[in-house]
Amino acid sequence: MELSLSNFDPRISQTLSRAGSILVRYPGRSFSSVLGSSLRQSVSNSFQKDNMTTEFMLQGHISSSVKRCLSSNYDTLLVAQDSTYYNLSGHKKMEGLCTLQGKILGSVQHNVLAMSPTGCPLGLLYQHNWTRGGEGSSLYACESDKWTSGLQSVNQHLGNCGKQVVLIQDRESDILSFMASPRCKNIDLLLRVY
């Protein structure tokens, strides 16, 4: 993931840059074992600042994703959107979780991923994290608004880009308000209905 360090305080930028350069050398190893206690704690403290929202941290990545989409050799881009549910029930001391199903507690994340027609990822165009009735849930009047927010992001980043864009989502998106939402002429919707 690209993280635009120019938006950060210089001290935080330096810490994150150092941690990033170490982490990429040891893929598959745990964050803590690679960074050690002191650097891990510095990175953790940096990400706990009030301005460290998902949107803020993803700015650089989304900008790079759009550049990759625009410079790709393909006339058509595929963009998939869907939600991921994180089961955090095993983390007994964690606060602010929502009920996902039955007694399962966790959080929800909605992602919009751009890809080439061959399925090669070009990057995220949108991501939102929330817990039902809690942190981050105020963005949506109802949870199904996540589909429209994803479409708005695709309109913003790839609308009128000179390429055909096919926005793909599953049957949960079969909502009239989503299908009737304004979209740029180069953006088509593909919904799984069965």
Image (cartoon, rainbow, N blue to C red):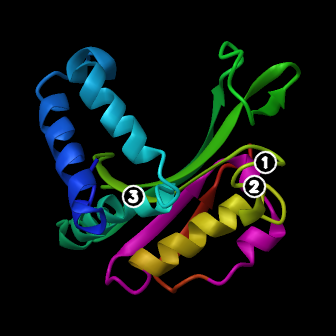
Q: Viewed as shown, does residue 152 lie left or right of 61?
A: right
Q: Check disc 1 and report the residue beneath it.
A: 134
Please say if 21 is above or below 62.
above
Mark 1 touches mark 2? (CB < 8 Å): yes
Residue at the image point whose x is 19% and y is 39% from the top: 20
The amino acid beneath tag 3 is: Leu
Residue 75 vs residue 99, the one in the foreground: 99
Instruction: Assess whether residue 162 is covered by the magenta stretch.
Output: yes
The amino acid beneath tag 2 is: Ser
The amino acid beneath tag 1 is: Gly
Magenta residues? 159-182
Q: Viewed as shown, does residue 83 lie left or right of 113?
A: right
The local crowd at label 1, few if under 14, some if 14 to 19, many if 20 or more residues have their Cα within 10 Å, is: few
Residue at the image point whose x is 78% and y is 48% from the top: 134
Q: Check disc 2 and report the residue beneath it.
A: 137
Q: Circle 3 — which element?
A: helix
Query: Which labelled disc corresponds to residue 58?
Result: 3
Label 2 and label 3: CA atoms lie apart by: 19 Å
Instruction: Assess whether residue 46 is covered by the magenta stretch.
Output: no
Q: Viewed as shown, does residue 13 lie left or right of 161?
A: left
Classify the position of the C terminus by image quarter: top right
Rendered location of residue 21, percent (x, y): 12, 38
Q: Circle 1 — which element?
A: loop
Q: Circle 2 — which element?
A: helix
Rendered location of residue 63, percent (x, y): 30, 68
Rendered location of residue 46, percent (x, y): 38, 46
